[in-house]
Image (cartoon, rainbow, N blue to C red):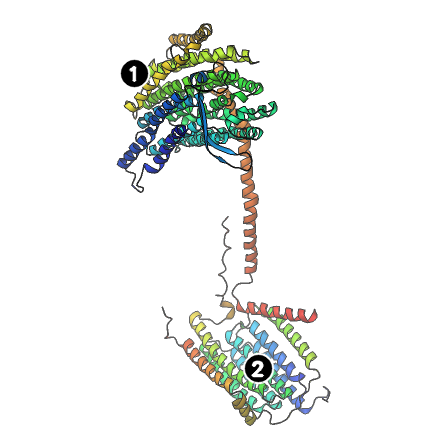
């Protein structure tokens, strides 16, 4: 137990030390030299905890390799791999109602997810040293990543729903801080606010879901909640509420709109959010609480996933911004995981989560290297980078292969696992899920090929003069290192491979690749997205969902806010100012008498005395 | 002697003094009017002294005191008037308006 | 008991005549258009008042009235008029714009006061006894019973003297 707590606390300590200690002693001027010193110190503080945590996680793997497991569905790979289960608590907070247990739990799911988190976070931290060289706010940035990592680890290991919620909210905060890292640009801070608000919308539902579960089960401990015998209605209500939070954090339809905008943050942050921490949390929580998810909730999740995976893949096909392509691909891949969950196979979902975490982090970091070199996010500004950037080219090629699901990459095995689960699920919407997933495989192949071709082949666009410098080795090493799990992780699940299903998937994926390849060969300069024809514009706009939200939510809210502001200025302030002006006017009236003429004063005085005397006598 | 005669005379004198104080512009005239009012009071004091037969003659003694004080007051008053005249070249009461705020366009509110 | 209000006794007739003179002179003081005339009418008014005091047997007060008011105060006022270079002769603007209101207030004051005193002293009667206000009596009263206020008054006079000097001297500057 202490080991798990240490794993959670190590990045947290790193974050605190990085925030407080990077510029210690305070008051030093922000010269170039001091900034560099602070950045160096912050980098060490951010990176060192992670390998230590990984070593400790290795110890946890050894500890959980045997043991009485939890009650997972058969074939759940992490339960088979690490069946052990431990939990412990450091105290119980009496709330007067349902107590809160400050405790952690360790099982295969949490250990494996934690390993993913730490590996990706380590890659991102190392990568950021090079990517953000010379950024004066690097120390706080690195500290926030550490905090982010720590929050995600808390979610992963939490044994109590409210403890989990602490980490959950901390992630929301960190995503806000990191997406808005370059807040000087108004668009970035807006994207940060959007991410914060949209996820918060889901989090409210999530919190109420926790309350419902906790009060129904009489305990917030996850083990107690899972063991409790709850009525179906309560479960459906609670899990649907939880689903709101899941949709927010894991960027599922309809709360996915923050994710493409979150590309405003630095690229390593995108890698972290998309691969390991934020979006994984939603899938993770469903897997963690999977036994209590009733069929109606899973069906809802399945429909959302089916819509989301195809829509996001189509949107990815039409984007010109490389990072947005990857963002939509994340939404699409997350929808795969959600679909696997809906099909009743948390094992497949988590397996895909991990392989996706590896290859999506790789893709984002490669994209970062490309963008670092080109100085622009847009695919139309890239091209022909194959020779200039050999390492990012090869690593990204592997990443795209994993995304498409080509053997022998991890994506092949995990995606096949998902499709296998969909094919053989008992879900009533099995056909919808399977069909949607299969089409999406093809579209995935298409958009991955398109981005690959547009980025690395063809004519090289002229570089902007300020950029074009080579990426430092701290940016290249993580790429190479992440290639390893991308290539090899899948073999963990190689035993479950079903050849027939895998062949179908592979063929469909290759079909998508081939279509784009053919279109590109026909006209190398043109964007293969023209294949979409009249659907291109809606796809590029992500089916106008942002506009719909704008019309339905943002504008009425803004109008309401304007109304409130107007009311405030005209009615509330008006009353205040009006009373002030009334007083001023009255005083002006009174002032007419106060003109400094002493005779007038005495006249008034005497008249008043007379009136009083007469009044006193008469009355 | 009916007391009512002197008191009525005194009341009329006092009212005339009031009128003078309120209506005259020249400060010296105002001072004269103040003297009229003081004298009205004096007349009252004497009349009441006679009427009440005060053993200590408080009324008449007080009248003497008032006369003395009035003399002092006129001295001080005239000194003040002269000082004002030196500084302002005028002793017109309705032009000495330093008591009031200067009349200006109304102070704009900040809203 | 006291005699009736009418017919008035000889003393009362004299008093009333003097009172009419005093009131008339006072009216002229506050209405005349010439500053110097106002001072002179003030002399007439004070003189008539001194006569009133005599009738009321307050002879010492009467002489003091003549000495101080007519002799000193009016002379002071005349000095004031001269020193402020007031116009000698008629001047049109001796009354301020406040005149009408002042008249109303003054008439009201007169009305209130007269009605009050008439209502209050209709029956009061003061038999006159010569010698009550003689110099001997007054001297005795002042220096036997009122000596302390008298001394205080002398100090006040000294203070007024110094104050007047300070106010009217031009070579004393305010302390910076």
Whether residue A404 is visible, yes or no, is no
Parent chain of label 2: B
- Identify which residue, C11 or A281, lies in the foreground: A281
Taking A22 as reference, is A331 left or right? right
Residue B79: image location, x then y, percent: 45, 77
- Identify which residue, A303 or A243, lies in the foreground: A243
Residue shown at 63% from the left, 74% from the top: C109
Q: Taking C46 as reference, is A351 above or below it? A: above
The residue where tag 2 is placed is B39
What secondary structure is found at the residue carrying circle 1? helix
Residue A611: image location, x then y, percent: 64, 69
Residue shown at 43% from the left, 31% from the top: A176
Q: Residues within 10 Å of mark 1 (few under 14, many from 20)?
A: few
Q: In the picture, residue A172 is in which quadrant?
A: top left
Q: How many labels, in total?
A: 2
The disc label shown at residue A390, or none: 1
Parent chain of label 1: A
Q: In the picture, residue C5 is in which quadrant?
A: bottom right
Whether residue A214 is visible, yes or no, is yes
Q: In the picture, residue B22 is in which quadrant?
A: bottom right
């Amino acid at each position: 137990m202490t080991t798990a707590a240490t794993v959670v606390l190590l990045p947290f300590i790193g974050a605190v030390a990085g925030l407080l200690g990077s510029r210690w002693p305070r008051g030093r001027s922000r010269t170039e030299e001091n900034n560099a010193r602070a950045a160096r110190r912050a980098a060490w503080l951010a990176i060192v905890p992670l390998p230590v945590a990984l070593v400790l996680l290795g110890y946890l793997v050894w500890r959980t390799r045997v043991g009485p497991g939890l009650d997972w569905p058969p074939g759940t790979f992490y339960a088979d791999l690490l069946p052990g289960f431990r939990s412990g608590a450091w105290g119980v907070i009496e709330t007067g109602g349902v107590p809160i247990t400050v405790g952690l739990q360790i099982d295969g799911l949490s250990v494996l997810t934690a390993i993913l988190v730490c590996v990706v976070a380590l890659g991102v931290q190392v990568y950021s040293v090079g990517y953000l060289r010379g950024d004066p706010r690097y120390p706080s940035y690195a500290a926030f990543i550490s905090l982010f990592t720590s929050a995600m680890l808390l979610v992963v290991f939490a044994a109590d729903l409210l403890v989990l919620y602490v980490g959950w909210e901390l992630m929301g905060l960190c995503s806000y801080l990191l997406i808005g890292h370059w807040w000087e640009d108004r668009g970035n801070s807006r994207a940060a606010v959007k991410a914060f608000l949209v996820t918060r919308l889901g989090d409210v539902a999530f919190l109420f879901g926790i309350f419902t579960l906790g009060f129904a089960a009489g305990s917030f401990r996850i083990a107690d909640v899972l063991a409790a015998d709850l009525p179906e209605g309560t479960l459906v209500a609670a899990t649907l509420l939880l689903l709101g939070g899941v949709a927010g954090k894991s960027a599922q339809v309809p709360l996915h709109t923050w994710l493409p905008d979150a590309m405003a943050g630095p690229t390593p942050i995108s890698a972290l959010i998309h691969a390991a921490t934020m979006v994984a949390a939603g899938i993770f929580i469903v897997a963690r609480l999977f036994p209590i998810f009733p069929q109606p909730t899973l069906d809802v999740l399945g429909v959302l996933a089916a819509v989301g995976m195809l829509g996001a893949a189509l949107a990815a096909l039409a984007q010109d911004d490389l990072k947005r392509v990857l963002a939509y691909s994340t939404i699409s891949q997350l929808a795969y995981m959600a679909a696997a969950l809906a099909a009743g196979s948390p094992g497949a979902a988590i397996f895909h989560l991990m392989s996706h975490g590896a290859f999506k982090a790789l893709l984002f970091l490669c994209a970062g290297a490309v963008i670092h070199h080109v100085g622009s996010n847009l695919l139309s500004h890239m091209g022909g980078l194959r020779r200039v950037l050999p390492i990012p080219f090869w690593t990204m090629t592997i990443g795209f292969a994993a995304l498409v699901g080509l053997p022998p990459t991890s994506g092949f095995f995990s995606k096949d696992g998902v499709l296998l689960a969909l094919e053989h699920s008992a879900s009533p919407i099995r056909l919808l899920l399977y069909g949607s997933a299969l089409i999406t495989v093809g579209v995935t192949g298409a958009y991955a090929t398109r981005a690959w071709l547009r980025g690395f082949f063809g004519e090289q666009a002229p570089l902007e003069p300020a950029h074009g410098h080579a990426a430092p080795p701290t940016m290249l090493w993580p790429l190479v290192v992440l290639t390893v799990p991308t290539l090899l992780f899948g073999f963990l699940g190689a035993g479950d491979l079903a050849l027939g299903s895998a062949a179908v998937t592979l063929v469909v994926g290759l079909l998508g690749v081939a279509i784009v390849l053919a279109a590109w060969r026909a006209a190398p300069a043109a964007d293969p997205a023209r294949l979409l024809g009249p659907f291109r514009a809606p796809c590029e706009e992500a089916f106008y969902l942002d506009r719909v939200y704008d019309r339905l939510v943002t504008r009425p809210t803004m109008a309401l806010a304007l109304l409130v502001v107007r009311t405030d200025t005209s009615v509330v302030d008006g009353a205040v100012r009006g009373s002030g002006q009334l007083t001023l006017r009255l005083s002006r009236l009174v002032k007419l008498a106060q003109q400094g003429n002493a005779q007038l004063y005495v006249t008034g005085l005497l008249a008043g005395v007379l009136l009083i005397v007469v009044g006193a006598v008469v009355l | 002697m009916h007391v009512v005669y002197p008191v009525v005379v005194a009341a009329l004198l006092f009212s005339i003094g009031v009128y003078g104080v309120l209506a005259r512009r020249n400060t010296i005239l105002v001072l004269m009017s103040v003297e009229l009012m003081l004298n009205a009071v004096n007349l009252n004091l004497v009349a009441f002294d006679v009427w009440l037969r005060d053993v200590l003659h408080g009324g008449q003694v007080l009248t003497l005191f008032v006369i003395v004080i009035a003399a002092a007051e006129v001295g001080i008053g005239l000194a003040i008037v002269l000082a004002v005249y030196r500084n302002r070249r005028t002793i017109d009461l309705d032009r000495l308006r330093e008591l009031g705020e200067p009349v200006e366009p109304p102070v704009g509110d900040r809203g | 008991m006291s005699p009736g209000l009418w017919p008035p006794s000889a003393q009362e007739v004299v008093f009333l005549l003097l009172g009419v003179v005093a009131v008339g002179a006072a009216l002229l003081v506050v209405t005349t258009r010439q500053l110097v005339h106002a001072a002179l009418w003030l002399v007439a008014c004070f003189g008539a008042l001194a006569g009133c005091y005599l009738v009321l047997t307050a002879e010492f007060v009467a002489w003091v009235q003549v000495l101080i008011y007519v002799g000193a105060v009016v002379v002071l006022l005349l000095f004031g008029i001269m020193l402020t270079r007031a116009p000698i002769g008629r001047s049109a603007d001796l009354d301020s714009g406040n005149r009408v209101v002042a008249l109303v207030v003054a008439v009201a004051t007169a009305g209130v006061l007269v009605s009050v005193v008439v209502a209050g002293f209709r029956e009061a009667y003061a038999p006159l006894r010569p010698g009550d206000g003689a110099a001997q009596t007054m001297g005795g009263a002042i220096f036997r019973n009122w000596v302390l206020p008298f001394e205080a008054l002398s100090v006040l006079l000294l203070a007024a003297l110094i104050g007047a000097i300070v106010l009217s001297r031009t070579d004393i500057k305010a302390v910076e």
